[in-house]
Amino acid sequence: MPRLEFKDLRVTYATQGEDGPRTLTAVDGVNLVVEPGSTLGLAGESGCGKSTLAMSVLRLLPANAKVEGSILLGGENVPDLSWGRLRTVRWTEASIVFQGAMHSLNPVRKVREQIAEALRIHAKALPYKDDAARDTRVAELLELVDLSPAKGASYPHELSGGQKQRVMIAMALACDPELIIADEPTTALDVIVQAQVLNVLTALVASRGLSLIMISHDLSVLAATCERIVVMQQGKIVEDGPSADVMRTPQHPHTRALAAAFPLIGDPASRLRLPGYTAPDAPGANPLEKSGTFTAPDPADVVLEARDLSVTFAGRGGDVKAVDSVNLTCGRGEIVALVGQSGSGKTTLARTMLALQRPTSGEVLFEGKALSHNRKALKDYRRSVQFVLQDPSAALNPKHSVYEAVAEGPRLHKLPGNEREIVTAALRKAELNPPERFLAAIPQELSGGQRQRVVIAGALALDPEFLVADEPVASLDASVRAEILALLLRLRCELGLGALVITHDLGLAWNIADRVVVMFEGRIVEEGRVEDVLLNPQHEYTRKLLSVVPTNNVVEDDASVAIGAGA
Amino acid sequence: MSTSVRTTPDQPPTLSPSTGPGRGQRSVAAARRIQRAREVWAEFAANRAGLIGLVLLGVVILLAFLAPVLAPEETLNVTRITSSQNEPPTWANPLGTDPAGRSILAMLVWGARISLLVGFAATAVSMLIGTVVGMAAGHFTGVTQGVLMRVIDFFLVVPSLVLAIVLSSVIGPGVATIVIAIGITSWAGTARLVRSQTLSVESRAYIERSWALGASDAHIIGKHVLPAVMPLVLANTTLTVGSAIIAESTLSFLGMGDPGQISWGSMLKAALDTGAATGGYWWFVLTPGIAIVLVVLCFTLVGRAFESVINPTLRGR
């Protein structure tokens, strides 16, 4: 008997549209079987219905959801279960590791109590009736996820993101369920912590014979953990097969798009090359395309420079050096990737370079001149160096139309010329064609990728010399990620616009950057040409970063090109 | 899993290139504004209590406007009155007469003018000060913020009635005095509210983007913060009008008003002074009191309904 089986499952949401009630189909006729002890990866972009599918297993969907078809959990049909039976089944037979550990824990209770909560609720069925037995069990669970039992006395805010996520896994394991559903367990975590969490999950599955359903938009994460991958698009399953096959020979175009979005570091086919755009100086690019106005960036022609820059924040228990004596140069028309894990000070460095943050010591130089902090000089500087933010949904005023958002810069600087022409030209440069279609739209009417293009258009409207982009694709879907990166690469090649791109994603650096700068605890530990740093890392930290990048096992055998994947 | 309604990206109308710079956008923006106003109205109308309040308020305001027609001024002229003093309600005088023989109904209608006028004017003063100071206290940091916050705190803790009495005794009694006294003493709460909204708006990423584009303080406040705090201020306004009307009654009752003008507060004062309250002439005491309660209730209902429109989380509570 399969552990879990979906039979022709359809989930629809009744929503309120502009013109009366509408229904929205989230899951559309899914048939899926999960055998005991197997691991299944569920991939797809946001809105493809993968979380709805997962939540339907424990009947955790909101009240406006309508479920048709059957969900057989260990032979019982979940939609038909009585309330009492459902409560018993929840957590003892199947449990969920929720998305976003940051927000899924109660901030005012110790994690020990939160893990014990499930034990207390299911005390009748399980041998954890008294506090002592529960305490031993909680300690045992914490050890399972590689946390010392003493950590149980901490409150969520005292733990790091990875530790919180491991607490969530311990909670899911509490009642010894047969099936664990992990909903984007590593999405908010940086690569190093992601590797830790994935290791814990894989080890548990192997040692206890659990069934695991893991949801992610990142195919390489799934390939590292699961035997089988199922790809969903618009509520339907479009591809289903063993991980290796799906990664090596994707059949469906959507799978190919998802797989292509995360490049293999070291693979020349993705160097300065993205689906949809290839830089003229990419390895093996058609020499005929090399004609035109493109000239390779000259690192000696420095546009933006940080000289011995330090930023210190006053924190509890002493000052925190977010940026520590950093020297950084960015050449004209050059894309520099600044990589590091969260908390390494890269965003603070970017904000300081943009003069949004005052340095404690050291200086920022633009075209050889030190930046002064008087109003006039700052305004001129901001016309030349523009900012692209991480989350495009938050970076646009929800009340302003695209036109107003893009025209904001030109209006502030009172640029000469026809405002409408400036705006449409900027939109065209950001590949929003035809611009007229977008002028009157407000951000909520646009997709995530279009919003990020509007932010970029807003920056381009000022005709800047240089861009600073803070995690420009971190909050975007895989296929959109490739499009936005292609845009940045095209701007570099066709307009000679350089950029400092901050990221924790080494694949991004491989895709578009000329040089890469590795930052660790506020200091720059390694920098150089992308090929040199990523293929032949010198510093221990760079090696560690590279070792935890989940790679497709496709090219892994071809060790001459690829970096050995340690994860 | 988000279940919120994502509006379908309807095709924005294609604009002909012949329209001048910005003109096409402006008409589109205007259309959107009208559309938004319709939505707000539909949501407001769905709240029955708010709708009843709004209708009643409309009636009261209409009556106040029509006062000279409904009850010509000479009916209140003590030298021309035919009715006797302290007459209980009759068909000729539906709400009875006051100790001078004037029709209480006529006085009530005239009093509505002053009460509403003071209510609106004082609220306008209070909202203006509150919004400006609140936005400044939220936007600026350091010394400016510190000083502004201490000023707000001062006005929050100062006993407003005492301050109003002192002010009116300095400026001299009159309608303007009452307006200023109420306005100056009641803005601090609004300022706190506006400040917290300003802080939350300014933490959004689009403010950071605006700074990076080279924005000035005035641009940030005018283009981003003010439009975001405005709905909150408007909802708060309707709630404040109610309390301003009560404050007006209190101050008039205490004799700070213009003795030549009838307001609901001064009617209550007259009732007390002439012994109507103790003499059993209930119609002179109750009617202005009930009028105050009714109008304030209407403003509260409208304000609450409006609040639930701009803050959907309050709906159904």
Image (cartoon, coloured by chain):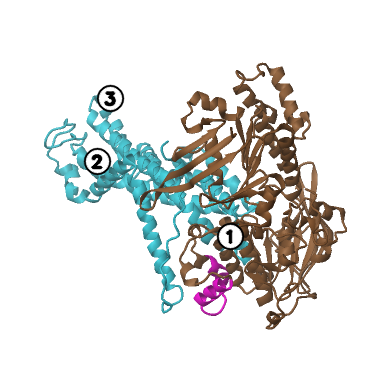
Chain colours: A brown, B cyan
Expressed as whole percent of the image width and height from the top left, the position of residue B237 reads: 42, 47
Q: Secondary structure at mark 2?
A: helix
Task: Specify whether disc 3 shares its chain with disc 1.
Answer: no
| Residue sitting nearer the eye, B299 or B51 | B51
Q: Answer yes or no: is residue A358 visible.
A: no
Marks 2 and 1, Cα distance to the nearest angstrom? 77 Å
Chain letter, disc 1 residue: A
Expressed as whole percent of the image width and height from the top left, the position of residue B63 reads: 23, 47
Expressed as whole percent of the image width and height from the top left, the position of residue A529 reads: 81, 67
Which residue position is annotated with label 3? B278
Which residues lie in the magenta part?
A: A405-429
Which one is in front in this view, the residue at disc 2 or the one at disc 1? Answer: 1
Task: Specify whether disc 2 shares its chain with disc 1.
Answer: no
| Residue sitting nearer the eye, A306 or A100 | A100
Task: Specify whether disc 2 shares its chain with disc 3.
Answer: yes
Q: Secondary structure at mark 3?
A: helix
Which residue position is annotated with label 2? B108
Q: Which residue is pictured at 57% across the width and 42% down the height?
A: B153
Which residue position is annotated with label 1? A253
